[in-house]
Image (spheres, rainbow, N blue to C red):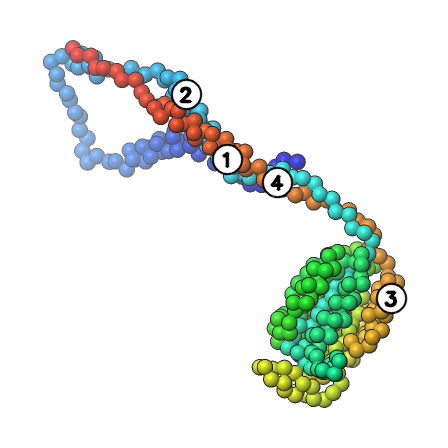
Amino acid sequence: MFEFHWPWAALLLPLPWLLRHVWPRLRSGAGEAHEAPATEQRVTLRHPRIEALADAFQTRRPRRRLAGWVYEALLALLWAALVVALMRPQWLEPYTEISRPGYDLMVAVDASHSMEALDFTVGGRQVSRMAVVKGVIGRFIDHREGDRVGLILFGTEAFLLAPLTLDRQAVSRLLDGVVPSIAGPATALGDGIALGVRTLRERPTGSRVMVVIADGDNNAGRFTPGEAAQLARLAGVRIYVIGVGSREERIPITEDGRIRYRDDLTMDEDALRRIAEVTGGAYFRATDTDALEAISTRIDALEKTRAEARTAYLPRPLFRWPIGVALAALLALGLFPEGRRRLLVGARGG
């Protein structure tokens, strides 16, 4: 299918004709309107042989040569080709994408400063909450073959890092590059859920699933976790929550290159459970080795999104053709350097 991306540029086609014929008349009319002679005068020319003087200054309009017509035609062709190129002609090629039946999974990860807390131990050494999240969610994404997976980060604000896609490896690579505080030091848990709901509500009903990984602390954003959970329930989005964090009163965390102990990093499991209960999902602990299998089993029991075919039109620019015509016309103008030369008419004496 052929189309012009900027068809309104065709309004420039009559511009040379307007500048050549209309503009001089408007300019001369405006000049005459502004000229107001102070006193009306009549100029009289006296000559003993006025008829001979008139014949001496009489001229005739020269006939236009063929080169003159060719010159004008090339100028018109040059301008028309440039305008057509400006209109951005393009050929639209249809591309059809067929999606297999599967689930729409939006993963929302807490990327606030609290995810640097060192309240997990792996192999006898302390690891951060973010390291545990990457391991847990990375394995989860790798096993969701055939599903569309997206990624949301929330800190002080919430961001859509990866839209729903079948490319699970791309989502895993993006998750590997996440570091704590990349979205701000605070935690906008409600905004992260609300952003996921807004993305999933455009998908077919029955397979809208969100997996939220957080420590339950919400201290920023426009939505509270309760309000966001109600939005998810109304939109038919099930939320499965994975809580990260320990129940210790004093938790070590890396700050300014040193390890400090804080007593305000405890996990609010009650808030996370309420989010899961309101939306028909479930709550799990990140330390539970069976959490991923349980979540996968719950998701597999839902209705899959039916296979769908979407056709998009990919534009192929065609501006090179009118540009080529314009260059050819410009080169041809060099063959007629005197195409507008006028005939010389000698004056007759009297």
Residue located beneath label 2 in the image:
69
Is disc 1 in contact with disc 4, using a CB cutoff of under 8 Å? no
Work out whether 96 lies above or below 17: below
Q: Quadrant of residue 347?
A: top left
Mark 2 and mark 3: span between their CA atoms? 81 Å
Most distant residue in the left direction = 48
Mark 4 and mark 2: span between their CA atoms? 36 Å
Disc assigned to residue 297: 3
Work out whether 28 lies above or below 180: above
Compared across the picture, whether 240 is left or right of 220 comes to right
**What amino acid is labelled 2 in the image?**
Trp
Residue located beneath label 1 in the image:
323
**What amino acid is labelled 3 in the image?**
Thr
Quarter of the figure that contains the N terminus: top right
Residue at coordinates 78% horizontally, 80% vertically from top-left? 270
Mark 2 and mark 1: span between their CA atoms? 23 Å
Location of residue 118 in the rendering, given as x and y in whole percent from the top left corner:
69, 82
329 or 64, nearer to the observer: 329
Residue at coordinates 47% horizontally, 29% vertically from top-left? 328
Mark 1 and mark 3: span between their CA atoms? 60 Å
Number of marks in picture: 4
Mark 4 and mark 3: span between their CA atoms? 45 Å
68 or 337, nearer to the observer: 337
Quarter of the figure that contains the C terminus: top left
Is disc 2 in contact with disc 3, using a CB cutoff of under 8 Å? no
What secondary structure is found at the residue carrying circle 2? helix
Q: Residues within 10 Å of mark 4 (few under 14, many from 20)?
A: few
Residue located beneath label 4 in the image:
316
Mark 1 and mark 4: span between their CA atoms? 15 Å
Mark closer to the chain start, 1 or 4: 4
